[in-house]
């Protein structure tokens, strides 16, 4: 039996439905007449014979229908008729339909957009990379720390050599450089990668080749690069002869050996990589010198690809075993060190980790918004179902089964949510790249945060639409299931329908709406307060009146001698600019996005606890750094011009470091060993924030930039002038020194701090927007219920007025009703919020999850919105003309 | 109308009877019912109301084909003809039915 043939046969039926009925009639007629002819032979009259034949046959109609049904896809036909009916109903109320679809579009669209971001950023973050489900991130671990720690290149190689459950290990360390082509210099992000990088990802360059085995070994031995498709198209004008040409990168000529395919952006969530160099070129791009043979230099960021069928715990077990052997073999550098695998969406060294909590909150919030939207549309449907009560009763009386009526209601829900689902996906499609708008560009390079709309996102969104359908269909269904046939038919168009007793469904929907938006308001309030605390908290340096910019001589190809001369010259010129109070160089300014240098340290008289090798971060800073940045010195002095190559090596430590390593004694004049060199402590500086505004106080120190030279540095300027003013003056001075060098963006330190808190800002912005949306939807819901209540009680209100009630009495009565709903909603919301705000976890900063201020503010906003939503319909009711109201029915 | 003295048709045997009836050549609907009634010595009567739906179901499955022709009394009638597919189905169903009957008889005799 071929079912396929059956389908074809059935489909062909659709083309000849009219003829089928006709033929069926002929055939049955023939049957009856043949039988009648037989009966006639046995002596009956023609009429008697025909009547008897018909009687024998039974219901012709039934046989006809059963025969027809044999050909039909029954459910399909019924669905089609339900859909037709549903569309007709919706077309009849275009205003209602548009409002409902709009509400749901917002709800479903917001969900789909967040799904697409989660998919694009967390689950399949690397377009064009094959089998991402087998990829995991790899970091080191350090004893006593739960978070990720760095991993060194030799450790990485040993892990790769000794593990068997992995297809590949590969490194991808983000870095950046200024690329000058023609007269245009632009900062571009790139990666330092292991030679197997492109093979491990399954990415085939469209021109030239990837890296060859061995190209990641040897100090500066392989100056080759693979460039991105965008760089090739944008900066090299799609030059088809590009392979073999050279490009200066951080001062070293690199041969372009390949062009990556379109749509491949490297492996760093948040940024699109523009070029890749093999690890052998590490020294050129990384601060802190040659590190490929230094087991103590933990600088790499890496990934692994598990063999198919290997589970994460198995892989982790093998990895840990190998790492602990390394710890025994190299106790000096590896004691207490391990290695750890992370799911891609938890990758700690890119923006996946940063975005995770934000996306989590967003998911919760959009679900809330969807529920509120559903409640709103449910309410609309409900109000309409009262109007259609009569219709439903008639249909029920005519024999439509309850199931059939329910199906009709669900179909209408399906149409609404289907339309909304389709337009919601459109919204999500437009919002795919919207997330990036919320993140400001850093250092002139904008972030790359794509959403991905794939089968999984489509499926989830469809699921959401279906659940919506159920929710929508359910509301009127609850009401319909109570249809009291006789009662509804008797009461004609239902003057008493919707009295107190029956409005509970609508009222409770509004209560739910109010409570959900109250929760969102509380959440938004808490996050807003956190952001304010973060912004108002002192980072330990001046954020006002200090500007910062980058002076990149490394990318421009300066050698150290020329760079020193240039820096000296530039500093003299900057200090001479009008309005400049002080200026200083440093390798980094705090809260930027590049990493500090770090070094294992030793201190005279400090007993290192066993199993612990103290590693401390430091910054290389020039003369006047502390004065310019506004970081107070507790004792001692800051660096001066004489702390140069020829002077004694000096360091300034922060208070936490002084307390930790010198235990209350003054560290002034004591020695500290940094990267094998002993330095004399000449000052103690107040603690400040270094990498992250929310970090705890930690040991940190400063060394003299002149004694630890770098040609990629920042310039800080203390001045009351605006950044633009300084920027143009600075550009003039830089061009006077080197016509080819392009100046970088000049920003205030305030701006730098704000950029570092962008995840919080994004969360606040999104929660604010969505919270506002929720509030609006809830207010509309409240308004709708109030208006309906008023319209249903016109007669009662008129009667009251006729009996002597004042307008103000009616106003009071109705406001009380509306506010009682609000109060119930707020009470429910309060309970939910008290339970849920904990989940904001470390998005909160110096604000308790039950902060009374946030709760109070949410209450106030909710009340104001409720008052506004109730007042209009209440006022309308209070102005009722009693005579007209009484006459109306 | 079902006759009370008539044995109830075993479920699923209607297709088998129709297929068997058509095995000897094309027939129209009325003739099929007639032939079954006669062949069973008036023991089996197919309800007219279920004959046509059954024929249509068999058309859908492709076991029979229908074409218009002229009946013995010179009227336009719809004739059903067994297809190759239908013949296969007939053999399968007949075998199954025989097995079933044999098994039932075995049980009746043994116990």
Image (spheres, coloured by chain):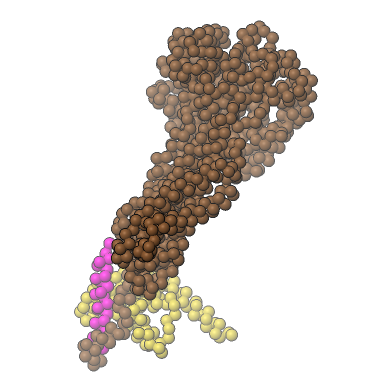
- Farthest residue to the bottom: give it: A43
Task: Please say whether residue B98 is visible from this viewpoint.
Answer: yes
**Quadrant assignment, res A287:** top right
The residues colored magenta run A12-41
The residue that appears at 64% across and 40% down in the rendered structure is A315
Chain A representation colour: brown
The front one of A599 and A585 is A585
| Residue A533, horizontal then vertical, whole percent | 57, 33
Q: Would you say the magenta stretch is mainly helix, strand or loop?
A: helix
Image spot of residue B103 (x, y percent): 53, 79
Q: Is residue A180 visible?
A: no
The outermost residue toward the front is A804
For the point 61% across and 26% down, the residue is A689
Left or right, A823 with reference to A158: left
Which chain is tinted yellow?
A: B
Question: Residue at the spot x=75%, y=16% of the render?
Answer: A670
Residue A224: image location, x then y, percent? 52, 21
Task: Locate the N terminus of chain A and report the quarter of the image it occupies.
Answer: bottom left
Looking at the picture, tell me which residue is in the foreground, A423 or A271: A423
Residue A857 belongs to the span the image colors magenta: no
Nearest to the observer: residue A374 or residue A579: A579
- Image quarter where the C terminus of chain A lies is bottom left
The quarter of the displayed image where residue A409 is located: bottom left
What residue lies at 52% left-to-right and 25% top-to-bottom? A750
What number of labels is visible? 0
Residue A25 in magenta stretch? yes
Residue A648, percent across and down?
69, 9
Q: Is residue A462 left or right of residue A327?
A: left
Left or right placement of residue A807 versus residue A751 in this view: left
Q: Is residue A36 above or below residue A516?
A: below
């Amino acid at each position: 039996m071929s079912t396929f043939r059956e389908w074809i046969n059935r489909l062909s039926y659709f083309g000849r439905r009219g003829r089928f009925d006709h033929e069926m009639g002929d055939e049955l007629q023939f049957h009856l007449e043949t039988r009648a002819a037989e009966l006639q032979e046995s002596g009956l009259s023609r009429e008697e014979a025909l009547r008897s034949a018909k009687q024998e046959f039974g219901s012709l109609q039934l046989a006809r229908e059963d025969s027809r049904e044999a050909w039909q896809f029954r459910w399909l036909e019924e669905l089609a008729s339900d859909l037709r009916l549903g569309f007709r109903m919706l077309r009849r109320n275009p205003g209602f339909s548009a409002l409902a679809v709009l509400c749901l579009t917002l709800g479903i669209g917001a969900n789909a957009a967040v799904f697409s971001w989660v998919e694009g950023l967390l689950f399949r973050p690397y377009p064009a990379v094959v089998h991402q489900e087998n990829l995991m991130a790899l970091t080191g671990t350090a004893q006593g720390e739960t978070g990720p720690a760095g991993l060194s290149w030799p450790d990485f190689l040993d892990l790769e050599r000794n593990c068997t459950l992995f297809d590949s290990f590969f490194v991808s360390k983000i870095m950046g450089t200024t690329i000058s082509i023609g007269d245009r210099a632009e900062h571009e992000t790139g990666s330092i990668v292991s030679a197997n990088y492109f093979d491990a990802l399954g990415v085939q360059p469209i021109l030239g080749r990837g890296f060859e085995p061995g190209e990641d070994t040897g100090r500066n031995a392989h100056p080759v690069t693979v460039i991105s498709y965008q760089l090739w198209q944008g900066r090299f004008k799609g030059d088809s002869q590009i392979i073999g040409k050279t490009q200066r990168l951080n001062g070293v000529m690199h041969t372009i050996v390949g062009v990556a395919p379109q749509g491949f952006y490297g492996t760093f969530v948040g940024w699109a990589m523009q070029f890749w160099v093999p690890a052998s070129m590490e020294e050129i791009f990384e601060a802190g010198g040659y590190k490929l043979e230094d087991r103590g230099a933990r600088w790499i960021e890496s990934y692994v690809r598990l063999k198919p069928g290997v589970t994460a715990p198995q892989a982790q077990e093998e990895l840990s075993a190998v790492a602990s052997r390394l710890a025994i073999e190299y106790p000096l550098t590896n004691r207490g060190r391990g290695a750890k695998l992370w799911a891609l969406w938890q990758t700690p060294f890119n923006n996946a980790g940063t975005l995770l909590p934000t996306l989590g909150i967003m998911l919760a919030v959009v679900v809330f918004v969807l529920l509120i939207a559903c409640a709103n549309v449910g309410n609309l449907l409900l109000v309409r179902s009262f109007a259609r009560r009569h219709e439903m009763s008639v249909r029920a009386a005519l024999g439509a089964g309850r199931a059939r009526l329910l199906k009709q209601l669900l179909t209408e829900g399906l149409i609404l949510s289907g339309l909304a689902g389709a337009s919601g996906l459109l919204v999500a499609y437009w919002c795919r790249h919207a997330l990036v708008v919320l993140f400001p560009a850093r250092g002139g390079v904008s972030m790359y945060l794509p959403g991905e709309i794939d089968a999984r996102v489509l499926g989830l969104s469809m699921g959401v639409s279906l659940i919506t359908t159920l929710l929508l269909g359910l509301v009127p269904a609850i009401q319909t299931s109570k249809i009291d046939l006789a009662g509804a038919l008797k009461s004609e168009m239902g003057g008493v329908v919707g009295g107190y007793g029956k409005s509970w469904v609508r009222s409770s929907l509004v209560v739910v709406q109010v409570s959900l938006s109250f929760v969102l308001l509380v959440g938004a309030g808490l996050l807003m307060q956190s952001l304010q605390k973060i912004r108002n908290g002192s980072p330990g340096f001046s954020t006002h009146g200090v500007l910062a910019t980058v002076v990149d001589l490394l990318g421009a190809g300066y050698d150290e001698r020329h760079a020193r001369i240039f820096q000296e010259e530039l500093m003299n010129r900057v200090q001479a600019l009008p309005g400049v109070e002080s200026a200083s160089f440093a390798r980094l300014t705090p809260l930027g996005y590049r990493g500090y240098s770090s070094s294992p340290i030793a201190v005279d008289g400090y007993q290192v606890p066993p199993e612990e090798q103290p590693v401390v971060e430091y910054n290389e800073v020039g003369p006047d750094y502390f004065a310019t940045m506004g970081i107070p010195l507790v004792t001692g002095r800051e660096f001066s011009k004489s702390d140069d190559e020829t002077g004694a090596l000096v360091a300034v430590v922060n208070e936490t470091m002084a307390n930790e390593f010198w235990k209350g004694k003054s560290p002034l004049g004591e020695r500290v060993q940094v990267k094998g060199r002993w330095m004399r402590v000449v000052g103690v500086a107040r603690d400040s924030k270094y990498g992250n505004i929310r970090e705890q106080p930690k040991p940190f120190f400063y060394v003299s930039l002149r004694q630890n030279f770098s040609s990629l540095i920042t310039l800080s300027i203390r001045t009351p002038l605006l950044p633009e003013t300084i920027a143009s003056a600075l550009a003039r001075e830089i061009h006077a020194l080197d016509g080819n060098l392009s100046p970088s963006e000049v920003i205030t330190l305030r701006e730098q701090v704000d950029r570092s808190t962008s995840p919080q800002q994004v969360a606040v912005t999104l929660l604010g927007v969505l919270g506002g949306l929720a509030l609006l939807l809830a207010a509309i819901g409240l308004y709708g219920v109030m208006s309906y209540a008023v319209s249903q009680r016109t007669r009662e209100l008129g009667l009251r007025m006729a009996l002597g009630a004042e307008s103000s009495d009616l106003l009071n009565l109705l406001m009380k009703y509306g506010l009682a709903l609000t109060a119930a909603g707020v009470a429910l919301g309060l309970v939910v919020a008290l339970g849920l705000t904990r989940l904001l976890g470390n998005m909160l900063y110096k604000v308790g999850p039950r902060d009374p201020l946030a709760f109070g503010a949410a209450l106030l906003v909710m009340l104001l919105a409720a008052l506004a939503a109730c007042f209009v319909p209440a006022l309308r009711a209070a102005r009722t003309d009693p005579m007209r109201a009484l006459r109306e029915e | 109308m079902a006759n009370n003295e008539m044995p109830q048709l075993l479920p699923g045997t209607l297709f088998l009877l129709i297929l068997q009836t058509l095995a000897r050549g094309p027939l129209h609907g009325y003739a099929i019912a007639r032939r079954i009634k006669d062949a069973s010595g008036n023991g089996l009567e197919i309800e007219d109301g279920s004959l046509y739906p059954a024929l249509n179901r068999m058309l859908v499955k492709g076991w029979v084909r229908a074409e218009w022709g002229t009946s013995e009394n010179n009227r336009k009638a719809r004739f059903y003809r067994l297809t190759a597919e239908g013949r296969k189905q007939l053999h399968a169903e007949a075998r199954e039915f025989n097995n079933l009957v044999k098994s039932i008889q075995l049980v009746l005799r043994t116990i």
